[in-house]
């Protein structure tokens, strides 16, 4: 019941904020507000370990869709790097107007060495927020790994050491992708 009340209040606040924004002088970008400082604003949903799969997916997918729909308006940088010991890996990074990363796509190879998939990294206000990888999804809260989920959004029960190692690995690859 508390969750229903939370979602009803959240929906009301969201609708109210959108109505107020439509009367303001800010210009919208595909559902994302542009503030006076010209940065894309999207608020990360607050989730807990007791949040059910459906609620996690329902809270995250609209944000992912809004970011994806705004990419054509952002600065796009394409490069080829050696990532995961694979040379010439295609990497695409989209930046906001204030040069904060918004999304990174990094190609990955299959067992035969052919690029067949991508790892996707999404950022909110320049901070890593979400990563969609093969067989796993990761949610971050201000660059801190919050949830390690399977491809169906189910939160995995991962030993702390492995959880911390994965967080460090993802943050390391992000640093590498952004520095080159």
Image (cartoon, rainbow, N blue to C red):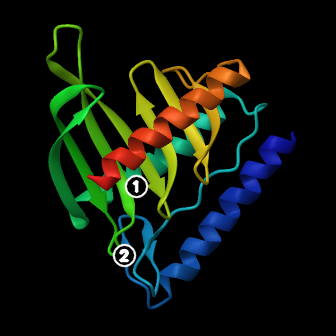
**Farthest right residue in view:** 1
Q: In which quarter of the image is residue 47?
A: top right
Q: In this view, does 108 lie to the left or right of 145?
A: left
The picture places residue 13, in percent across and down from the top left corner, at: 69, 66
The picture places residue 133, in percent across and down from the top left corner, at: 40, 28
Which of the pair 99/12 is nearer the observer? 99
Q: In this view, does 92 lie to the left or right of 84?
A: left
Earlier residue among tags 2 and 1: 1
Q: Residue 138 carries which label?
A: none
Which of the pair 60/96 is nearer the observer? 96
30 up-or-down from 120: above or below: below
Numbered circles on residues, count: 2
Q: In this view, does 71 lie to the left or right of 126?
A: left
**Farthest bottom residue in view:** 25
Q: Is residue 98 left or right of residue 142?
A: left
Q: Which residue is drawn at 38% across and 21% down?
A: 134
Q: Nearer the viewer, mark 2 or mark 1?
A: 2
Q: Which residue is drawn at 39% across and 75% down?
A: 28
Asked which secondary structure carries label 2, the reply is: loop
Distance between the alpha carbons at the discs numbered 2 and 1:
18 Å
Please rate how many residues cluster around mark 1, counting C-alpha atoms within 10 Å: few if below 14, some from 14 to 19, many from 20. Answer: some
Q: Quadrant of the N terminus?
A: top right
Q: Is residue 155 visible?
A: no
Please rate how many residues cluster around mark 2, counting C-alpha atoms within 10 Å: few if below 14, some from 14 to 19, many from 20. Answer: few
165 up-or-down from 32: above or below: above
Label 1 sits on residue: 66
Q: Which residue is drawn at 15% across and 48% down?
A: 79
Label 2 sits on residue: 98
Q: Which residue is drawn at 65% across and 19% down?
A: 156
Asked which secondary structure carries label 1, the reply is: helix
Which of the pair 174/98 is nearer the observer? 174
175 up-or-down from 10: above or below: above
């Amino acid at each position: 019941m508390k969750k229903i009340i939370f979602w009803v209040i959240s929906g009301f606040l969201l609708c109210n904020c959108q109505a107020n924004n439509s009367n303001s002088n800010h210009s919208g970008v595909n559902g994302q507000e542009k503030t006076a400082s010209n940065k894309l604003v999207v608020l990360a949903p607050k989730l807990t370990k007791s949040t059910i799969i459906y609620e996690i997916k329902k809270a995250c997918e609209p944000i992912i869709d809004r970011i994806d729909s705004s990419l054509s308006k952002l600065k796009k940088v394409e490069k080829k790097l050696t990532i995961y010991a694979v040379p010439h890996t295609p990497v695409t990074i989209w930046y906001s107007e204030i040069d904060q990363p918004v999304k990174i796509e990094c190609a990955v190879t299959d067992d035969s060495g052919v690029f067949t998939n991508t790892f996707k990294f999404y950022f909110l206000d320049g901070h890593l927020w979400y990563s969609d990888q093969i067989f796993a999804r990761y949610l971050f809260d201000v660059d801190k790994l919050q949830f390690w989920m399977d491809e169906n959004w189910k939160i995995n029960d991962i030993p702390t050491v492995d959880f911390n190692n994965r967080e460090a690995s993802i943050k390391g690859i992000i640093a590498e992708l952004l520095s080159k």
